Every structure is written in structure tokens, then in C-alpha cells.
Amino acid sequence: MELSTKPILPGSFVVVKDTNSIYRGYKGFVQRVTKKRAAVLFEGGNWDKLITFQLANLEIV
């Protein structure tokens, strides 16, 4: 497994890489980061969703 050299910070665009998540492959915008989690905002057409993920399950785009 390759580790990303860039840290995930608020304002980063990320993609969900968790194989068990229904959001796998979705690209979103990081709103806030706490110890091991990040809140990611997904915007799509007529809906917006803010979901929290483990940092290990996200990858910078």
C-alpha cells in the first residue's frame, strides 16, 4: 500500500477508497479534519451531503 505524501487538510479534494462504503469512488471537498477523521462534503445536482470518514479511507485527488 502506497502512502500519500500530501496531508489531507480542509479544502482538499478527495476520493473515497473504502471498498465497504456506498460512497466509494465519490469525489468530495474536505470541510474539517479531526484526529483520525475528516468531514467530506459531496455536492451533486439537487443534493448536498456531509459525511465523516476515517482518513485512511480517503485519497487526495
Image (tube, helix red, strand yellow):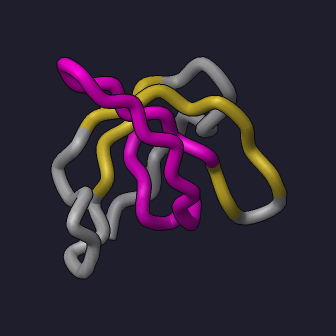
Instruction: Tell me what residue is drawn at x 22 percent, y 43 percent.
Output: 26
The relative height of residue 37 versus residue 7 in the rendered view (above or below) is: below
State which quadrant residue 19 falls in. Answer: bottom left
Q: Locate the N terminus and report the quarter of the image it occupies.
A: bottom left
Instruction: Residue 36: give x, y in percent of width and height.
Output: 72, 64
Picture layout, residue 14 above or below residue 19: above
Q: Main secondary structure of the magenta part?
A: strand
In front here: 13 or 5?
13
Residue 57 counted in the magenta span? yes
Q: Nearer the viewer, residue 14 or 47?
A: 47
- Find the magenta span and give its range: 39-61
**Picture residue at 81% right of the left edge, 52% below the top:** 34
Q: Is residue 50 magenta?
A: yes
Q: Position of residue 12 (x, y in %)?
A: 53, 24
Q: How many marks?
A: 0
Residue 27 is situated, as x and y percent measured from the top left of the image, at 28, 35
Quick one: which residue is furthest to the front in this view? Answer: 46
| Side (left or right) of 19 relative to 51 | left
Q: Position of residue 59 (x, y in %)?
A: 38, 46
Q: Quadrant of the C terminus?
A: top left
Question: Does residue 47 sit above or below 18 in this rendering?
Answer: above
Q: Work out whether residue 23 or residue 3 is closer to the camera in this orientation and state it.
A: 23
Name the residue: 33% across, 25% down.
43
Figure quadrant of residue 57: bottom left
Hey, which residue is sitting farthest bottom in the picture?
A: 20
- What's the residue at 60%, 18% (across, down)? 11
